[in-house]
Amino acid sequence: MKKRVFSGIQPSEVIHIGNYIGAVRRWVELQNDPEKENIFCVVDLHALTVRQEPEKLRERTMELMALFIAVGLDPEKSLLFLQSHVSVNAEGAWLLNCVTPEAWLKKMTQYKDKSAKQEIVLTGLFDYPVLMAADILFYDTDEVPVGEDQKQHVELARNIAERFNHHYGETFIVPEPVIGKVGARIMGLDDPTAKMSKSSAHIKGHAIRLLDEPKDIEKSIMRAVTDSGSDIRFSKEPEKAGVNNLLSIYQALTKKSAEEVERDFANARGYGDLKKAVAQVVIAETAPIRERHAELMKDRGELTRIINMGTEKARAISEPRLTDVKRKMGLIV
Ligand code: AMP
Ligand code: TRP
């Protein structure tokens, strides 16, 4: 039996190299694995957990769907869909809300971080992990490939599945988080002690955005914070975090071993050489994506056709499970 894989990404802000290395690029590899059956979702309902400008959200949602395809996801091979177009996800989240103790949600570290930054914390932000659990569970998912930061949310989905199964009988598959070994946590170029994040992507020099022009990519990398030394090696020492991060990006994109990467820089004359080499591999990887993306964005009709195809397929998978859950919980179906 093939393993069913589910993952999602929000159309909030623009996608950066951390999202690419930690998530989307791994999805393309999964697509080519004959042992996997893949579902990838643009989670627009999740984006609503913080305030969005409606027109911008719509535009970024289209952009993200086009980006899926530009990076190499194929709507014939993987199921690509838009979360808000399949009501099972939101409806399923409500049903799961009614088996999830509030205390579990209060423990979520991402919620604590995000809510501390908001003047008004929306209920949706608090409940966001339950919607994510519904995304995962109603599609009978075996594996959830995500970056390190989402691991706790997948564990919550496991707990919800187990609790539901315990109360109502075997229903949900208990999913496994799958965290990549290399590049699971790309750090900000301006502050290598903090994760590169979408919410800071607008800050100059923080992120490498996937659709940035080559000259801007080069500029941000050349300005990346390093240290006052010249030693180019992987290291967990806090003062080497900047160099370590650049090496991690380089390693993730070249798929070399840590030893090979360090060997590549054995004769470098300093961090300038390292930065140039990193900029080169990043540009080589992103320039073709950027071009394909621009082409795809010109044909909205085709994008809409792809979205509608995904909606149909996603409904066919998740609706039977929703009916099953409703029946078990005592609703008339
Ligand atoms: P987000 O940007 O939080 O919507 O995350 C989308 C996906 O990218 C998730 O699978 C994250 O785990 C992953 N991700 C986000 N930021 C990073 C990062 N700095 N390094 C690696 N993966 C990341
Ligand atoms: N919460 C995830 C993030 O912000 C996105 C997401 C929503 C997701 N639903 C999912 C990821 C289901 C994996 C599986 O990155």
Image (cartoon, rainbow, N blue to C red):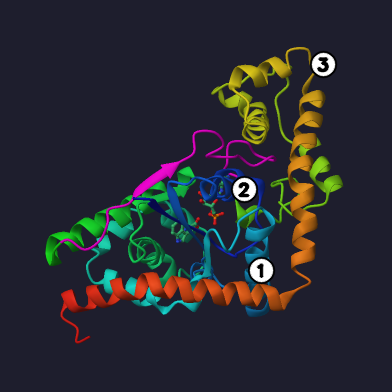
What residue sits right under mark 2 in the picture?
Answer: 20
Check the picture and name the quadrant holding the C terminus: bottom left
The percent position of residue 192, horizontal first and vertical second, equals 62, 36
What residue sits right under mark 1 in the picture?
Answer: 60
Residue 229 visible at all: no
Q: Is residue 267 rendered to the left or right of residue 39?
A: right
The percent position of residue 248, horizontal first and vertical second, equals 62, 31
* Type of the residue with mark 1: Arg
What residue sits right under mark 3 in the picture?
Answer: 269
Residue at the extreme right: 215
The answer for how far apart the CA atoms under marks 1 and 3 are is: 41 Å
Number of labels in the image equals: 3
The percent position of residue 154, horizontal first and vertical second, equals 36, 52
Mark 2, other Cα within 10 Å: few <14 / some 14–19 / many ≥20? some
The answer for how far apart the CA atoms under marks 3 and 2 are is: 29 Å
Q: Is residue 35 above or below residue 314?
A: above
For label 1, the SS is helix
- Determine which quarter of the picture holds residue 160: bottom left
- Determine which quarter of the picture holds residue 42: bottom right
Residue at the extreme bottom: 332
For marks 1 and 3 on the same chain, the one whose residue lies earlier in the sequence: 1
Residue 111 visible at all: yes
* Type of the residue with mark 2: Tyr
State which region is magenta: 170-196
Mark 3, other Cα within 10 Å: few <14 / some 14–19 / many ≥20? few
* Type of the residue with mark 3: Arg
Whether residue 171 appears in magenta in the rendering, the answer is yes
